[in-house]
Image: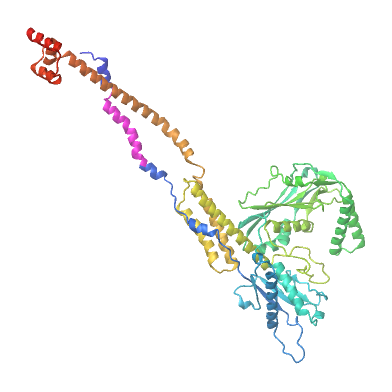
Amino acid sequence: MTLKTPKEVTETINPSGSRRLVLILCFPLFFLLAIPFWWYTTSIERLALPESRILALNNIVLPTPRAQILITADSDAFPPPAPGRKKFETKTILENLGKEVVKGVDGIYARDPESRRNTRWWDLVYNVDEYHQSPPMKVHFRLSQYANTSFPLEPYVQPPETGLMTSGNSAGTLVIPVHPDQIGDRNLKLHYKITLINAILSVFPSKVPKIPLRALSYTPNITLSFVLLNEDATEGSYVRSWDIQDAIRHHFLPHLEPLKHVFNFSIESQVLYHAPLSFEPIPGYVSQDRRESTLDEAVDVIKNANKINEKELAEAVEDMYAEQRQKTWFVSDEQMKIFVNAEKWSLDSASTNNPVLRFLLYVPSARHRPMQLATENTAQSFLLPQYGGVVLLNPSIPSSDISVFHLSMSALTPSFHLFTQHLYSLLALPALPYASNKLNTPPPLSPLQPPNDLIQPLTPWQVYQIMLARSKENCEETIKTLNGIVKLVRKIREMKVGQGVKAIVTGAVEKLELVQSTSMSVSEVFTLTREAVGLANQAFFDPSMMGLLYFPNEHKVAVYTPLFAPISIPLIIGLLRELIARKKRRQAKKKESEIAGREFPTEADTEREKGIISPKEIEVQSTEAPELSLDSIQTLRSRKVRL
């Protein structure tokens, strides 16, 4: 058995060079063949959005639907005709009065410059059948024994009535009362005209009101959270329970019911027994001026509550006077900003993801009572924009040693009256313009009853204005969101725009185009804009678009590099080594062939080594060198002689 040389052993174990090259090229060939599949699976679908239609929406002008105002009157609210003259029907008299009112309003608007001139977007009707829906506003001229006997007339908004004795007017009607003694006045028609013009201009603004920044942006679902917070129940003298259901039913539900077509409300409540402040209130005393004004207000409240007993009145005044003289803890303006201690107060609503408006009733501990705000009028409440409201409640200390309190509905009335005002501010609800020559507070149902200080529920025309304002807000928000989507898609090339997103965006555009091109009622316009802003937000936060929003090309390189670097580097090094080895083998073979040629010379090489030149070579040399020197010729002759 012959032993193999190391070279032969190496060639036996290792594959041939061509085979190694094929094996190395299999890996990049596999990746090259997989590129189409990778391209198909990782390609981003980017469908075209209706950018031209979205751009056209920037110039959209939301039309203001014309409102209808129904005017009615008692048959005896106008003076009878003179003897021998024709008696006109009440409707005919109202039509003539309406023409004068419309002419007067248009004349008032015409006084302004044309660039700032307002327009009238309401019409007067005198019969319900002339309008397919119930008009948002009703005006009624009423003959009343309890009306003011002097001019000007005092219009008011009819509050809800219960019981057997009612006025016959529906809640929300704008009533213009007239006393029987005023019927014979020759200027009564002029007073009717002036009163009606002032009332309509005050409740129907010429421009759609804007939503203030403090108000919550429109969202169809809102949660109202009522929280009773005790600063520290361990110190005693804390509130353990409250009649929250009765308070909500009496104070809030009448204001929420008219908004059922605009918002969907859900209500929750809780009681916290430990809600410490993150700061120390400032101790001080109430000024003398404020002390006297507080006592005057207390006297008025007690009188309005029919507490006319002199002894009870004196005791109440003395108690409030003693309370004002004691040490008071004040909350400054800067402390109001950090009053809500979100870190230690469990105010988050775990039952819903809807926006939450929080109404916080804060009860200070016994050592921090009474607590007031350091304002000019030492108010007991303040508003947190787009968040909620806070009311400070200082329970009166009874003579007996009682450390636990229960808040009845009557005790909650002042606080919930403030909460109602906060609700109007946070939702941008229009308030009735109580002012001279505009609107007056409604009279009591009976002269024996005191006037009601609670805020009247929303009237149909107030809901009408809310829908107009929210429609405008939704329209602007939709256009803003759609433009944002277009800019993002243009800027981020990796953002996916699938068929679902395109359909949603197109649906939002169609809703706004339908609003602009079609004459609709305010409720229909509001519904379309609400759906449009919902679709726009749905497209903006679509998961398919958000998936690649934060992954640019740099992130892709960072993802693929750890995967392909460990594989590609050995392949590249192996390929380079194989190419170098192949080059070396070729050079080695070339050298071997040269050495082999030297070991086995041919006959021509032998003759050439012996110095024998064939005749052909001589001819070649002679042709290559036709001109020879004398020395060369002699050398050739000597070679021939030797041969």
Magenta span includes 25: yes
Q: Nearer the viewer, residue 587 or 283?
A: 587
Drawn side of residue 126 relative to residue 542, left or right: right
Q: Is residue 505 left or right of residue 458?
A: left
Q: Which residue is found at the position 72% from the left and 89% from the top?
A: 86
Measured as percent of width and height from the top left, residue 386 is found at 67, 52
**In the depicted structure, whether residue 430 falls above or below residue 501:** below
Answer above or below: position of 567 versus 524.
above
Instruction: Give the residue displayed 12% in from the left and 10% down from the top.
Output: 634
Residue 509 drawn in magenta: no
The image shows residue 453, relative to residue 347, as above or below, that is: below
Residue 205 image offset from top left, x and y in percent: 68, 66
The boundaries of the magenta stretch are 14-35
Q: Quadrant of the C terminus?
A: top left
Q: In which image quadrant can residue 442 be found?
A: bottom right
51 relative position to 591: left or right = right
Q: Give the left or right position of residue 496, taking residue 282 as reference.
A: left
Instruction: Identify the image quadrant of residue 27.
Output: top left
Figure quadrant of the N terminus: top left
**Residue at image coords 82%, 80%:** 181
Residue 251 percent location from the top left of the image? 73, 60
